[in-house]
């Protein structure tokens, strides 16, 4: 086989690629209902573009695996593993098809969104595993196939954050986060000798004024956005081979979640102390106490919005700072003198 033919994708691989693009477009249409109605998930509009960017960034490596250019001569993948991958591919396509039918008939909902998203992810990973070619049309080995799967993890798996995250994580922990934030903030106030009392998720001050830790203050917005940002930064900027890169990326996502929760606690603590000293209505004014719409109102927005924006910017800065630290983790230091 000539080198020119070796470097071309075969018809089956191109067809599967077009199928996956169509599935991603349908998934975008399905999840659009979440992105456009849930303020916590406006980052979802970036998911198709970031997924496409990471795929484009890795395309040369992925194409070389799919055409056999970088496949080594080794023992072929076991038949049992290939059968499992084929079953995963067919099962994922069936799951996607069922979810798409339910979405078209019944509209948006937890069932269709979960089926569509998991179907797309499973189909993309299984097709990547099965489409790898060995050198000179020989059967590809398992290591090469798993390398292709690794390149597809973010482009395929990011769809699970922008949609199913709402049903699998958000709805399950939002109430618990809200309660914990209220308890922590009230504990900090008591530690500073403030005689407050808690009524549900409302903190009542000694003068009778009160501030409620609303659902938006649970931290789920910053948590979902930080998990998405951590996954993207890890996919693009964290280095190393398997399993080092995988461990670094998982660590960055975990750090993103912890960072979001801690900064949200700090944000709510600041807002509560501000309300304690300036009144609860001051949170809907700017730092100078000017109400929205009045002359001189700050372009930074209300105190409440400013605190949220500062927390998000701080989270992004911390996540970016974690990247070089994680890249150095576990790698031997070079003690050679410079030239």
Image: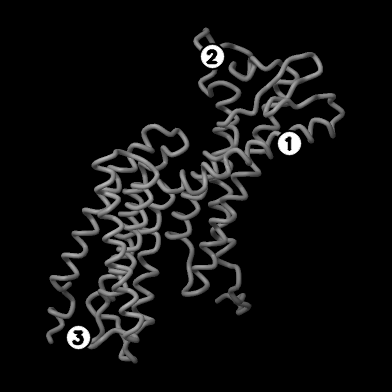
Q: Look at discs 2 and 1 and give the one toward the viewer.
A: 1
Label 1 residue SS: helix
Q: Residue at x 28, y 46 (%)?
A: 102
Which residue is the site of mark 3? 137
Say whether residue 68 is left or right of residue 112.
left
**Percent position (x, y) of residue 267?**
65, 34
User: What percent of the width, then of the height, locates residue 337?
Assistant: 61, 78
Q: Which residue is mark 1?
A: 183
Task: Find residue 13 and report its image quarter.
Answer: bottom left
Mark-to-mark CA distance, 1 and 3: 63 Å
Mark with earlier residue (2, 1)? 1
Residue appearing at x 60%, y 77% in the figure: 332
Mark earlier in primary sequence (1, 3): 3
Residue in the foreground of this view, choosing between 66 and 38: 38
- Secondary structure under the numbered disc 2 in the rendered image: loop
Q: Is residue 171 left or right of residue 189?
A: left
Secondary element at tag 3: helix
Q: Which residue is mark 2?
A: 297
The x and y percentages for residue 192 are: 84, 31
- For label 1, count other residues whose C-alpha is less than 10 Å away and answer few (under 14), some (14-19) or many (20+): some
Q: Nearer the viewer, residue 287 or 119?
A: 119
Q: Position of residue 247 (x, y in %)?
A: 54, 67
């Amino acid at each position: 086989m000539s080198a020119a033919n070796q470097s071309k994708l075969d018809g089956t691989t191109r067809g599967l690629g077009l199928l996956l693009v169509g599935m991603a477009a349908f998934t975008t249409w399905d999840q659009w209902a979440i992105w456009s109605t849930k303020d916590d998930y406006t980052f979802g509009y970036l998911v198709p573009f970031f997924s496409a960017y990471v795929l484009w960034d890795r395309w040369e490596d992925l194409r070389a695996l799919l055409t056999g250019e970088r496949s080594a001569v080794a023992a072929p993948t076991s038949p049992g593993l290939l059968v499992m991958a084929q079953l995963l591919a067919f099962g994922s396509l069936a799951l996607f098809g069922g979810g798409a039918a339910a979405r078209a008939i019944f509209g948006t909902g937890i069932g269709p969104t979960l089926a569509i998203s998991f179907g797309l992810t499973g189909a993309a990973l299984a097709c990547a595993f099965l489409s790898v070619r060995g050198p000179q049309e020989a059967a590809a080995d398992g290591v090469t196939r798993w390398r292709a799967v690794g390149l597809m993890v973010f482009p395929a798996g990011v769809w699970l954050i922008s949609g199913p995250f709402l049903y699998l994580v958000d709805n399950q922990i939002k109430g618990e986060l809200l309660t914990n934030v209220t308890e922590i903030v009230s504990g900090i106030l008591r530690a500073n000798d403030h005689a407050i009392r808690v009524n549900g998720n409302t903190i009542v001050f000694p003068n009778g004024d009160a501030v409620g830790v609303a659902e938006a203050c649970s931290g789920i917005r910053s948590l979902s956005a930080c998990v998405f940002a951590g996954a993207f930064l890890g996919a693009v900027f964290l280095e190393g081979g398997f399993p080092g890169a995988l461990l670094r990326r998982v660590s960055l996502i975990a750090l993103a979640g912890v960072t979001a929760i801690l900064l949200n606690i700090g944000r709510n603590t600041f807002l509560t102390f501000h309300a304690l000293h300036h009144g609860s209505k001051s949170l809907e004014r700017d730092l100078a106490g000017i109400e929205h719409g009045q002359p001189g109102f700050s372009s930074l927005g209300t105190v409440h919005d400013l605190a949220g924006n500062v927390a998000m910017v701080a989270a992004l800065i911390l996540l970016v700072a974690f990247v070089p630290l994680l890249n150095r983790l576990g790698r031997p230091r070079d003690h050679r003198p410079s030239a």
